[in-house]
């Protein structure tokens, strides 16, 4: 059985996305730098192969409704932010309150829409992931719910050198956690820390 | 002229101290680990000589009233948390609303009580620091005021692997900041990141 991991980009002041997400702004509005939270991901892909592989090599993914699409979008026809061939190449379970048929895109990514909660989504993900890890892909609300429920094994933070001052905050209403530091590294654009949650 | 620096221990969720500070609990109450935010400082002093030297080698220090002493303490006789010979060995300017005579302790530490604000304290510190750096020693409110005013050159975070969930939050009401990463390192107890604030 693989681990349940969560890798997420975060500002120094603890935000993982801005407010007012739209189709053009999947990370919402951030005050200082355009899409600053993933600048390292797109700008230094060669230097971060290990981290990027970690983010995309899971056997199944779980994400929140807001990470799948912006609110207000025509839900029945929205196919995600990622184009015809999303980077997941595995089943993706989307937490939602509104049932929808599976959406199979190119390269092995199929979105499944789960309406009965985070435990159910995790069970479904485990059933298809085999020996591979399960990745909680975001956003903040989804990660915080899994942290609250004690269901995450490892948290991989990619700390981006900005203070943004507002947005979606990681760890909101999450009870105290003790971590073990597994790895730490970085470049001029980001600091990576891989934590194991001590249970 | 030296730089204005701030080195501070911070939890992964952005807190630099707990609530309900008392004479016995200078870091306040934290829910998981007793004094977890400075465990690396006392438990791994040999491995962190560079960082500890950085924290104590400034030519002058500035701190808030709450860092100097807990609220409710008999203010006129309180001599700080640090015993007869505090680790500063330099002038320390304490931001307060209540005037008080200078307090000279052993080893060159003299506490000066400044009642006319953060700009005045910084000017007084610069006047005595010579070529050395000026350290904003804490706590959260004081650091946040200097960040808000754009008066800090470098922020050295010591990120401790815990989520504490409550306490005094760094960056509260601080406007957006872009950092340059100057250094990053760590051990199993802490991750050090040295940031320069881009102005």
Image (tube, coloured by chain):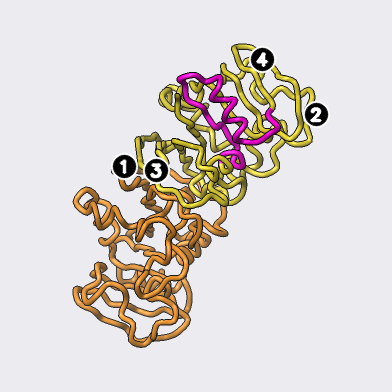
Chain colours: A yellow, B orange
Quarter-of-image position of residue A96: top right
Q: Is residue A25 visible?
A: no
Nearest-to-viewer mark from 4 and 1 = 4
The answer to whether any part of residue A50 appears in the image is: yes
Q: Nearer the viewer, residue A127 or A34?
A: A127
Q: Height in image: A34 above or below B168?
A: above
Q: Nearer the viewer, mark 2 or mark 3?
A: 3
Q: Earlier in the sequence, mark 4 or mark 2?
A: 2
Residue B185's tag is 1
Residue at position x 48%, y 21% from top? A57
Q: Are marks 2 and 3 in contact (CB under 8 Å)?
A: no
Q: Residue furthest top?
A: A107
Do tag 4 and tag 3 residues touch (Cβ < 8 Å)? Answer: no
Q: Which segment is the magenta one? A: A114-143
Residue on which disc 2 sits = A74
Decide: few, some or many residues near mark 4? Use Cα within 10 Å; few <14, some 14-19, many ≥20: some
A191 left or right of A119? left
Tag of residue A105: 4
- Spatial CA span between label 1 and label 3: 22 Å
Question: Helix, strand, or loop for circle 4?
Answer: loop
Which chain does the residue under circle 1 lie in? B
Q: Are marks 4 and 2 in contact (CB under 8 Å)?
A: no
Mark 2–mark 1 Cα distance, whole angstroms, equals 46 Å
Residue A29 at x, y = what percent?
65, 42
State the residue in front, B4 or A69: A69
Q: Chain of mark 4?
A: A
Inter-mark Cα distance, 2 to 3: 41 Å
């Amino acid at each position: 059985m693989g681990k349940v991991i969560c890798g997420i980009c975060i500002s120094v002041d603890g935000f993982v996305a801005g407010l007012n997400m739209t189709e053009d702004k999947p990370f919402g509005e951030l005050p200082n730098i355009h899409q600053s939270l993933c600048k390292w991901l797109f700008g230094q892909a060669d230097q971060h192969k290990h981290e990027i592989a970690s983010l995309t090599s899971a056997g199944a993914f779980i994400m929140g409704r807001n990470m799948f699409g912006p609110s207000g979008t025509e839900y029945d026809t929205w196919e995600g932010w990622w184009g015809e061939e999303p980077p997941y190449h595995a089943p993706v379970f989307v937490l939602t309150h509104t049932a929808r048929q599976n959406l199979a895109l190119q390269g092995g990514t199929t979105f499944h829409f789960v309406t009965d909660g985070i435990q159910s989504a995790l069970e479904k993900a485990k059933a298809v992931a085999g020996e591979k890890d399960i990745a909680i892909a975001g956003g903040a609300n989804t990660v915080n719910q899994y942290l609250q429920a004690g269901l995450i094994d490892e948290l991989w933070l990619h700390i981006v050198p900005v203070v943004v001052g507002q947005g979606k905050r990681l760890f909101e209403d999450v009870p105290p956690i003790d971590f073990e530091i597994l790895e730490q590294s970085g470049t001029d654009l980001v600091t990576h820390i891989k934590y194991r949650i001590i249970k």
